[in-house]
Image (cartoon, rainbow, N blue to C red):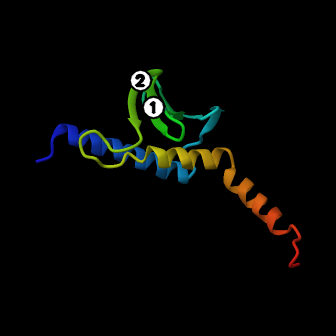
């Protein structure tokens, strides 16, 4: 029998997966707040008064080579949900927050196109074999 805490973990994972899906499909537009933090805002106009959801994804250095990834959600400026990377508390399932951060970072900072541009440039550099 699944406990309520295990269900909470599963809901957190589903929430992150759905956010990844919507981000990949251009349904959620993220902006760079500077450093290692990104934000997206969505307004639910189907209710009166309208409700504003703010999503924040942050990468924080915790050691020389280790990082913590946090996905926070606010509803009308009040904290609603916070999910961190790594195994979820009650199921040991991966939260996928790091994956979400990497997708957002690549998309917003256009790292993919910058990397491809740099690779093309390096490939065109003459060497002793050409």
Residue 8: x and y in percent read: 26, 39
- Compared with 55, 11 (above or below) is below
| Residue 18 visible here | yes
In percent of width and height, residue 123 lies at: 80, 68
- The residue shown at (48%, 49%) is 99
Name the spot of residue 109 as percent of width and height, x first: 68, 45
Toward the viewer: 64 or 107?
64
In front here: 48 or 89? 89
Left or right of 110? Residue 129 is right
Q: Are marks 2 and 1 in contact (CB under 8 Å)?
A: yes
Disc 2 to disc 1, how far (Cα)? 7 Å
Mark 1 burial class by Cα count in 10 Å: few <14, some 14-19, many 20+: some
Residue corresponding to mark 2? 79
Element type where label 1 sits in the image: strand
Q: Mark 2 or mark 1: name the one nearer the start of the chain.
A: 1
Q: Visible in this render: residue 27?
A: no
Tell me the number on the disc at residue 72. Answer: 1
Q: Residue at x 28, y 45 (%)?
A: 10
Q: Could you say which is closer to the camera, residue 128 or residue 123?
A: 128
Quarter of the image where the C terminus is located = bottom right
Q: Which mark is residue 114?
A: none
């Amino acid at each position: 029998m699944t406990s309520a805490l295990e269900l909470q973990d599963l809901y957190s994972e589903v929430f992150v997966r759905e956010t990844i899906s919507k981000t990949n499909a251009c349904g959620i537009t993220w902006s760079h707040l500077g450093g290692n933090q990104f934000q997206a805002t969505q307004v639910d106009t189907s209710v009166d008064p309208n409700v504003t959801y703010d999503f924040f994804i942050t990468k924080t250095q915790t050691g020389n080579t280790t990082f913590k990834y946090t996905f926070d959600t606010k509803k009308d400026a009040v904290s609603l949900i916070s999910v961190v990377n790594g195994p979820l508390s009650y199921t040991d399932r991966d939260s996928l927050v790091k994956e979400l951060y990497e997708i957002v970072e690549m998309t917003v900072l256009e790292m993919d196109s910058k990397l491809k541009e740099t690779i093309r440039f390096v490939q065109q550099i003459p060497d002793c074999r050409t």
